[in-house]
Image (tube, rainbow, N blue to C red):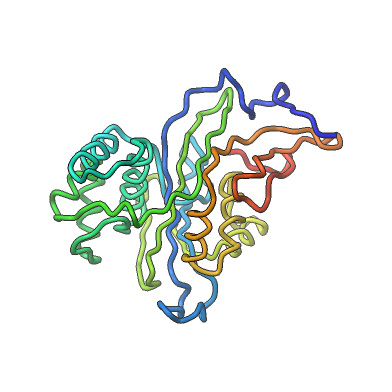
Amino acid sequence: MIAAMEDLDDMGEHADAAPATPAATLVVFRHAPGAGAGAGGAGGPPEILMVERSGTMNFAGGATVFPGGKVDPADLELAEAFMARTGRVFELADAAGRITAVRETLEETGLAVGLTGTVDATRAADARRLVLETGRLADVLEAFGWELDFDALVPFARWWPRHRNMRVFDTRFYLANLGTGAVEVTADATENRHLFWASAAEALRLADEQAIRIIFPTRRNLERLAQFSDFDAARAHALATPIVTVTPRIELRDGERWLVIASDAGYPVHGELVSQADRA
C-alpha cells in the first residue's frame, strides 16, 4: 500500500507552504591525492569539499553540507549586469544562483571557483577578505580584474521543499571542478566550523558511522555523486539529465511513513523511512 500522507506531516507539496528563499550551493570536485590530471584515477575516486555548519545556525546547524547560501539582492544585480554586458542569456534565477554559489564558496572556503583572470592563493585570500567585508562579488571582480566564468558551473539539481512550518529554501545545485588536490581551505569560523575533502562514498560512510551529520537532501545528492569515477562523468550525467525540481513528500508504505522524492530526477535512491531521515 502506498498513499500520500501530506495531512500527517509538515513535509509535502502544500499549497500553503512558507515562501521560499532562493539559494544556491556548489559541489566542488578535486582529484584525489596522488591522482593528477591524466592519472587515470590512480589516486582513487574524486573528492568533494564538505562544510560542517556551526551548531548555532538556525538552518541545518551542525550538519555537513556543500558550500552555499541564500541569494542576495547584490547577486541579482550582478547577474543582470553580467547578461546585459556580455549579451549572454540565462534565466535570471539561474544566473543569480551561479553568482551566489561562487560568492558563498569564496566566503566560506577561500576558493575562487567560477572566476577567470589572474587567480592565485594570495589574491584569492585577499578577495575573500573583501567579499566578507562588503558581501558583494561585484566588488571583487572590479578590484581584481576578474570575470565570471558561468561555463565552469554545471547545473546539477534543484530542491524546493514545501514545508508548512519550517524555513523553506529553493536551492539550485551546481558542480565545479577544482582539478588539483594541492589546495588549502579554511572555515570562515562564523557560519562554519570545519571543512574537509572526502569522496562521496566516504562522506556517506562517515554519516552512517555518525561521525558527521547529513540532512536528507545532502544524503540523496551524495548517493548520486558516488556513482561517478571522475568529474567528467558527473558533468556528462548532469548535462544529460533534465533538472526536475525535487519536492520531498511523505508516503505510507506498508504502514510506515517514508520521505520520498520523484523517481525521474536522476537519483539512485528515492527515499528513506521518516524515522531515519534527518530533515534539519
Instruction: In this rendered view, identify the residue nearer to me: 166 or 101.
Output: 101
- Residue in the image at 15% along x and 55% along y: 144
- In the rendered image, the vertical position of residue 229 relative to residue 77, given as above or below: below
Instruction: In this rendered view, identify the residue nearer to me: 235 or 125.
Output: 235
Number of disc labels:
0
Q: Position of residue 263 (x, y in %)?
A: 67, 44
- Residue in the image at 32% along x and 59% along y: 111
- In the rendered image, the vertical position of residue 109 relative to residue 248, given as above or below: below
Q: Position of residue 25 (x, y in %)?
A: 43, 47
Q: On the image, which quarter does residue 115 sit in? A: bottom left
- Residue in the image at 67% along x and 59% along y: 209
- Residue in the image at 37% along x and 65% along y: 178
Please indicate whether residue 255 sits to the left or right of residue 277 in the image: right
Instruction: In this rendered view, identify the residue nearer to me: 147 or 34.
Output: 147
Please indicate whether residue 267 sits to the left or right of residue 239 in the image: right
Q: On the image, which quarter does residue 260 sit in? A: top right
Q: Position of residue 202 (x, y in %)?
A: 59, 64
Q: Position of residue 139 (x, y in %)?
A: 17, 45
In what quadrant of the picture does the C terminus appear? Answer: top right
Q: On the image, which quarter does residue 205 sit in? A: bottom right
In what quadrant of the picture does the N terminus appear? Answer: top right
- In the rendered image, the vertical position of residue 149 relative to residue 83, given as above or below: below
Please indicate whether residue 155 sits to the left or right of residue 184 in the image: right
Instruction: In this rendered view, identify the residue nearer to me: 61 or 143.
Output: 143
